[in-house]
Amino acid sequence: MKRVPEPELMDSEEQTLAYAHADFEESNSLFTREFLERFEGLAGSGSMADLGCGPGDIAIRLANALPGWQVTGIDAGENMLRRAREHPGYPAVADRVSFHLAYLPDPTLQAGGWNALVSNSLLHHLPDPQVLWNSIGQLAADGAAVQVMDLVRPESKLAATDLVDRYADGAPEILREDFYNSLLAAYTVEEVTQQLEQARLDSLRVETVSDRHWLVSGTL
């Protein structure tokens, strides 16, 4: 199925409220678990950037799991960042987690200054996917841990509808619609492999980790 792009920024009051209250336990737990297992030898302290952090759940999860780390959630949506600061888990980690408004590529972000870079479900929003991969290459410190996860584009619109019915049954219609559009805008494993080659991120590898997610990981 040919990719169908969707809006780059999803930051309306209705959307951000729906995302903040949505149940992303399965996918966010998967992301967090994969990171901690793949980088179990991570140093006891460091700086991490969550690119496209949305309402902040993954940034807060990782901060809880890595008590010596400083985590910066970066997003281009002011409303999303407001939801992140309203996250019920934020006060407990507010001394180590900050949320920053930025639109990639952003030259004000510290080049080579991050010991870990993570991103979940940002890539399919970007008109040019190389913006994410190039930003990761520029922001990463030597030896930085990198993990990026996103949706896999299904083979057909019918398959996309089936995934929405399976995983968003009973969800608000705005979330069901966004999920469907995101599936159509997602990239395949083959396309992501080509993107990594183009960005010369040879140490990163992509693999399928669920029936609807691929995951890129490695160190730079």
Image (tube, rainbow, N blue to C red):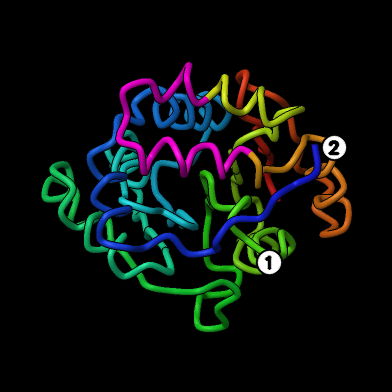
Most foreground residue, 216 or 121: 121
Residue 57 magenta: no
Picture coordinates of residue 48 (x, y %)?
45, 54
Please name whichever residue, 34 or 191, is drawn nearer the observer in this view of the structure: 191
Q: Are marks 2 and 1 in contact (CB under 8 Å)?
A: no
Q: Which residues are magenta?
A: 164-183
Q: Quick one: SS at disc 2?
A: helix
Residue matched to label 1: 131
The location of residue 6, given as percent across then percent down, is 59, 56
Quarter where residue 83 is shown: bottom left
Q: Please tell me whether the stretch drawn in magenta is mainly helix, strand or loop.
A: helix
User: Tag on residue 54?
Assistant: none
Cα separation, mark 2 vs mark 1, equals: 18 Å
Question: In the image, what residue occupies the spot 72% across and 43% down?
Answer: 187
Q: Position of residue 120 (x, y in %)?
A: 51, 44
Residue located 85% across and 57% down the image = 200
Q: Secondary structure at mark 1?
A: helix
Write down the residue under mark 2.
190
